């Protein structure tokens, strides 16, 4: 007989570090991991947002802490990882969620915007993965890394002008596969979620411009994501239930990528 299913998804005693965890999809995933028993360390740039998010999680009975930092700054990334190790002793799960976007036609795209998006969306993922692996996962020969890509990284779009965002998320896809291949020997799984449209601060402008109903109509399930739709997927990748899954990209998009390529 195998392991009971509740035990496979149980994260009791584990620590999850969630970047960009103070709101939106990051907070949704932190909530899921915390409800499964993990201690949560949130990080993002704004202390006030983090304090509020940690309080919300604590009110749900989740052990939550926070550290304010810029995920694109190598010194601050190391500070977050070192402080997490000092405060809770380990990092079992890393959810690489921090990200940004910037809209402009490719021919007029500002270099400063390109650098900002690329530094946060892919360089930051590398920095956090490297620091967490060296501090905790490689020495303990176990870890779960969940990178947040996007369906924008699975194909191009004619309507949405976000060349750096789409490029960075495409890079996250192959970063995930390449790192999974290299770090499997350490017992570390590396997977990615590729969300479609979810209501968030980042997507607010896009949803208002194109209309949530129009974007929902493009999905076979005829809806956009909600506050629950990433919870099961991130828990699968973070738990023992997903121990034989690595290097995979799971689109959570209502079926958009099934009919529009990717």
Image (tube, rainbow, N blue to C red):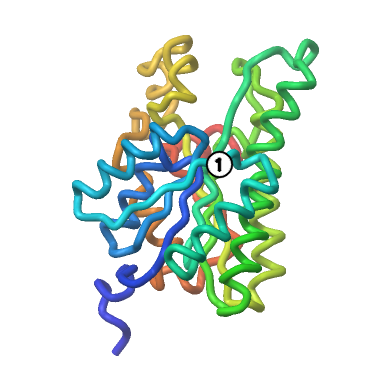
Q: Residue at x 55, y 52 (%)?
A: 80
Measured as percent of width and height from the top left, residue 177 is found at: 66, 58
Q: Residue at x 41, y 16 (%)?
A: 214
Give the quadrant of residue 98.
top right
Q: Is residue 163 left or right of residue 5?
A: right
Image quadrant in which the N terminus is located: bottom left
Give the quadrant of residue 149.
top right
- Residue that numbered label 1 is attached to: 69
Category of crowding for the residue at label 1, using alpha-carbon neighbours closer than 10 angstroms: few (below 14), some (14–19), many (at least 20): many
Q: Is residue 104 left or right of residue 142?
A: right
Question: Does residue 209 sit above or below 225 in this rendering?
Answer: above
Q: Residue at x 76, y 21 (%)?
A: 112
Measured as percent of width and height from the top left, residue 186 is found at: 63, 77
Measured as percent of width and height from the top left, residue 262 is found at: 61, 40
Q: Residue at x 66, y 31 (%)?
A: 166
- Name of the residue lying farthest toward the bottom: 1
Question: Does residue 136 sit above or below 148 in this rendering?
Answer: below
């Amino acid at each position: 007989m195998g392991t009971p299913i509740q035990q496979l998804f149980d994260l009791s005693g584990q620590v999850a570090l969630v970047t960009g965890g103070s709101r939106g999809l990051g907070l949704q995933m932190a909530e899921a991991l915390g409800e499964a028993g993990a201690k949560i360390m949130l990080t993002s740039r704004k202390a006030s947002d983090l304090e509020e998010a940690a309080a919300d999680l604590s009110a749900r009975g989740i052990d939550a802490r926070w550290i304010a930092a810029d995920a694109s700054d190598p010194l601050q990334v190391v500070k977050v990882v070192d402080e997490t190790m000092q405060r809770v002793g380990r990092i079992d799960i890393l959810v690489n969620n921090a990200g940004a976007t910037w809209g402009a036609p490719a021919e007029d795209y500002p270099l400063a915007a390109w650098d900002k998006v690329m530094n946060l969306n892919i360089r930051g993922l590398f920095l956090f993965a490297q620091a967490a692996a060296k501090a905790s996962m490689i020495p303990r020969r176990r870890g779960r890394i969940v990178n947040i890509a996007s369906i924008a990284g699975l194909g191009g779009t004619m309507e949405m002008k976000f060349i750096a965002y789409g490029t960075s998320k495409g890079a996250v896809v192959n970063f995930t596969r390449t790192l999974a291949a290299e770090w499997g020997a350490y017992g570390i799984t590396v997977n990615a979620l590729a969300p479609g449209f979810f209501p968030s601060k980042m997507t607010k402008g896009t949803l208002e411009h194109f209309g949530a109903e129009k974007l929902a109509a493009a999905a076979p399930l005829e809806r956009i994501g909600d506050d629950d739709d990433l919870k099961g997927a991130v828990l699968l990748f973070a738990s023992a239930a997903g121990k034989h899954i690595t290097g995979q990209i799971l689109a959570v998009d209502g079926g958009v990528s099934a009919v529009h390529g990717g």
